[in-house]
Amino acid sequence: MDNEREPLSESRTAGVVRHLEELIFDGDLQPGQFLPSEGELATAMGVSRLTVREGVRTLEARGLLEVRRGRRPAVAYPNAAPLSGFFAASLRRDPRNLLELVEVRLALEVHGTTLAARHATRTALTSLDLAFNTMSQANDEESFNQADVRFHAALAAASGNQMISFLIEAMDEPMRESRLRSLRGHLARGRSMDDIMDEHARILAAVRDRDARGAAEAMREHLIQTRMDLRTFLALPTSDAEG
Amino acid sequence: MDNEREPLSESRTAGVVRHLEELIFDGDLQPGQFLPSEGELATAMGVSRLTVREGVRTLEARGLLEVRRGRRPAVAYPNAAPLSGFFAASLRRDPRNLLELVEVRLALEVHGTTLAARHATRTALTSLDLAFNTMSQANDEESFNQADVRFHAALAAASGNQMISFLIEAMDEPMRESRLRSLRGHLARGRSMDDIMDEHARILAAVRDRDARGAAEAMREHLIQTRMDLRTFLALPTSDAEG
DNA sequence: GGTTGAGAACTTGTCAGATATGTGCGATGG
DNA sequence: CCATCGCACATATCTGACAAGTTCTCAACC
């Protein structure tokens, strides 16, 4: 019972999508540069403007094009929007996916921290310092969380691996709410803000010392604590297994 | 000089997208179920069918809808297509991103293996066995690689974390070509297929023994070898740093 | 009664043409 | 030289129409 059936010939919209992809990838178009207008593309490809529009929409949703009224479509700078959309949709579909996302984040951040300890440039370390200081001076939950996000983003950036950066960044927005919950759980467990600052301080020190293993371990411990905080808030068993 | 300008009121298409998202997420529509037809949606939302179509296309690109000619749009089952598209686009934009992807994969697979050792069900172990045996009996490059992919996919699935599974799966297709390169590099380094099988055997054994730490370590070593293989093929320095 | 098959009804895919509105550039005037 | 005002161009959206694929209905047939 193979119910799958390939269309005999790809739809015109699919053809437009492929054509546009070729323009973007193989057409020597740099991010920020403009494509021909919808009308021009339509006549060039022998389809109606409507069909071009649908293709353009598809590539916009994939984060490859930037469309604004009155301007021609522009090649987008690489960005994490598609990832962000994916994670956000996963969470909206089933909030239980939050715990899965936390695991992904743990894996990526621990490895990212390893890389950061090895490759962080001076400027990367500077922005890491900045975020850390902002955190320590924050006097309300909101600004603290904001600085916390910036710290982790700066650390991901320090890894020199943009893919990791994008993934971390993409999870920030969908997990914004969970950060608050985690903080509540943290306090509910009788722990203080100083603990959190200590954890971050250890990470920062190890990265600065180029101690890859120590930095990874510090990050791992921090994220395991965070995971327990979240589980506490969600009233789930707080297994303290290490990984 | 803030050149950003928010549109005074969101475009109608954006409104349609939000409306459709609400239908999908909050509308008690299960994957596989159908939305109202484009025409019905159009009259219900007071826009033209064209506008509805653009919204539908957007959500299709995000992996939330499945559209086929003659049928109404259906809610899609959660899938990794958007992730796959993202990774593929990243690689097409700049093949150097391959090494970054390898790092992401290392982070996720190592952690996924840890989870697999802890949580793998009996059936998950069975399919892992199956993939392993298929690998060992493969007699050409193509079928070997195919079984290799299945082994890693089964391992990711055994972690019980669908998010990790999706991410691994999403990287498979874009990295298909690199797998061949890695194999070439492997042989170029004077190593044999038996080495690869040994590495996999160690992983499998540790997972079976519920030895989370050992499984993670075996996977890490395997992926570091693979990374070196790839670097050899690409004629890059093969740093053997651990992480 | 159950099965099959031909349409009918519905739905998406695509086209054409038209209007509204935002962008950018160049002419114009101070 | 510089600000401003149009005008050409581009996207956003609508209407109406037809082609082509899918599903449902119902009658004819075994």
Image (spheres, coloured by chain):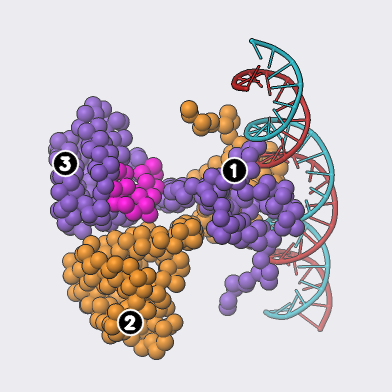
Chain colours: A orange, B purple, C red, D cyan
Residue drawn 31% across and 84% down?
A193
- Discs 2, 3: same chain: no
Looking at this view, is B121 or A73 the one in front?
B121
Q: Nearer the viewer, residue B220 or A133?
A: B220
As helix, strand or loop, the secondary structure at mark 2 comes to helix
Count all numbered tags in the image, as a single digit: 3
Q: Quadrant of residue C24?
A: bottom right
Disc 2 to disc 3: CB gap under 8 Å: no
Disc 1: host chain: B
What numbered label is drawn on residue B67? Answer: 1
Quadrant of the frame with the N terminus of chain B: bottom right
Give the image location of residue B132, x and y in percent.
22, 37
Mark 3: few/some/many CA within 10 Å (<14, 14-19, 20+): some
Q: Main secondary structure of the magenta part?
A: helix
Q: Amino acid at mark 1?
A: Val
**CA distance for labels 1 and 2:** 47 Å
Q: Which residues are magenta?
A: B153-174
* Same chain, labels 1 and 2: no
- The label shown at residue B201 is 3
Q: Amino acid at mark 3?
A: Ala
Task: Name the residue at 29% across, 71% down.
Answer: A228
The mark that comes first in sequence, 1 or 3, is 1
Q: Is residue B117 something one can see in this rendering? A: yes
Give me the disc on residue A187: 2
- Determine contact: label 1, label 2, CB under 8 Å: no
Chain where mark 2 sits: A
Q: Is residue B18 above or below residue A150?
A: above
